[in-house]
């Protein structure tokens, strides 16, 4: 992986952590697989909004698809946090901020 690619990946992760809904999704997806529809109900947010946040987290590599189930004629996707761990990334970010 080149330095530019690494920098781009870190920037995507940083951006993904900059929203409270995404942080809540990450916290919930850490303990068990979570779908966008279940998160929308739990958070009291519209499904479209929550699905968007899931896409941002997935693109940033902070969550990964772990299962799919057929539900009422559609497919519900379930995600968990990645093994690299978003909390480790957030911890390192906190350390960098503390250096300023």
Image (tube, rainbow, N blue to C red):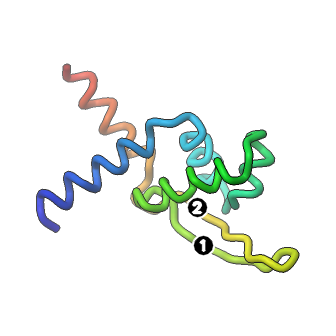
Which of disc 1 and disc 2 is earlier in sequence? 1
Residue 69 vs residue 50, the one in the foreground: 50
- Residue at coordinates 58% horizontally, 61% vertically from top-left? 80
Residue 74 vs residue 96, the one in the foreground: 74
Q: In the drawing, what numbered circle is on residue 16? A: none
Q: Indicate the position of residue 59 as horizontal and vertical percent values.
A: 43, 61
Residue 42 vs residue 95, the one in the foreground: 42
Image: 81 above or below 23 = below
- Residue at coordinates 29% horizontally, 47% vertically from top-left? 11
Residue most extreme to the front = 48
Residue most extreme to the left = 3
SS of the residue under disc 2 = strand
SS of the residue under disc 1 = strand
In the displayed structure, does residue 48 sit left or right of residue 83? right
Q: Indicate the position of residue 51 as horizontal and vertical percent values.
A: 63, 56
In the displayed structure, does residue 16 sit left or right of residue 41? left
Residue of label 1: 66
User: Crowdedness of circle 2 by 10 Å Cα count: few (<14), some, many (20+)?
Assistant: many
Q: In the drawing, what numbered circle is on residue 80? A: 2
In the displayed structure, does residue 34 sit left or right of residue 61? right
User: Crowdedness of circle 1 by 10 Å Cα count: few (<14), some, many (20+)?
Assistant: few
- Residue at coordinates 28% horizontally, 50% vertically from top-left? 10
Image: 94 above or below 48 = above
Q: Indicate the position of residue 12 as horizontal and vertical percent values.
A: 34, 50
Image quadrant containing the N terminus: bottom left
């Amino acid at each position: 992986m080149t330095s530019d690619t690494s920098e781009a990946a870190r920037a995507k992760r940083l951006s993904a952590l900059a929203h409270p809904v995404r942080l809540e999704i990450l916290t919930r997806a850490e303990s068990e697989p979570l779908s966008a529809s279940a998160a929308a109900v739990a958070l009291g947010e519209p499904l479209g909004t929550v699905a968007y946040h899931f896409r941002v987290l997935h693109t940033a590599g902070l969550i990964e698809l772990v299962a799919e189930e057929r539900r009422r004629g559609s497919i519900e996707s379930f995600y968990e946090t990645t093994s690299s761990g978003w909390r480790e990334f957030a911890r390192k970010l906190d350390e960098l901020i503390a250096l300023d």
